[in-house]
Image: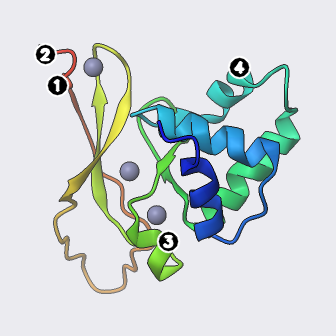
Amino acid sequence: MNPNKQQELLDQFKLRHTTCRLDVVAFFLSKKFAIAHIDLEHAFKHQFDRVTLYRTLKTFLEKGIIHKVLDDEGTPKYALCPSACAHLHHHHHDHVHFKCNVCGHTTCVEDIFIPQITLPQGFKVEEKNLLLSGVCPNCSK
Ligand SMILES: [Zn+2]
Ligand SMILES: [Zn+2]
Ligand SMILES: [Zn+2]
């Protein structure tokens, strides 16, 4: 991985470089799957406390660096956003997520979008989530 990738990403969002932000961004960049808060806590337990990690995630979420990924595990996970979120300054994607039953990882399938769903009058959609599950390409080799 390009060591400047983390800095670049923070610069793109006009975020000050803190050790925590840099390390958490690097962690997201190094993983190809969605990450839960607890995963960060385990990974950085000797460096950052829960509150610092929580704040970092919150900032990233608000800025459009990461988005929430809901799978069937009850706790939200997070994954890096497609670059469109950075340019538009708000989250702009409704791709599907895929949970692998073998490795347990949930990944963004960025090229596949949630189909348009028309609800009866009076319903106002604010969030869309579509989770598919099965076997990922890594595990079906
Ligand atoms: Zn986004
Ligand atoms: Zn898998
Ligand atoms: Zn996603």
Alpha-carbon span between mark 4 and mark 2:
28 Å
Alpha-carbon span between mark 1 and mark 4:
27 Å
Q: Position of residue 80 (x, y in %)?
A: 48, 50
Q: Which residue is mark 4?
A: 42
Q: Residue at x 80, y 43 (%)?
A: 19
Alpha-carbon span between mark 3 and mark 1:
28 Å
Q: Which residue is mark 1?
A: 137
Choose the circle earlier in sequence order: 4 or 3: 4
Q: Position of residue 106 (x, y in %)?
A: 37, 33
Q: Residues within 10 Å of mark 4 (few under 14, many from 20)?
A: few
Image side of residue 128 versus residue 29, left or right:
left
Label 1, ligand 2: CB separation under 8 Å: yes
Q: In front: 22, or 69?
A: 22
Image side of residue 64 versus residue 118, left or right:
right
Give, as a three-letter code, the residue at label 3: Ala
Q: Residue at x 70, y 45 (%)?
A: 22
Alpha-carbon span between mark 2 and mark 1:
5 Å
Say whether marks 3 and 1 touch (CB < 8 Å).
no
Choose the circle earlier in sequence order: 1 or 4: 4
Give, as a three-letter code, the residue at label 4: His
Q: Position of residue 30 (x, y in %)?
A: 49, 32
Image side of residue 20 versus residue 119, left or right:
right
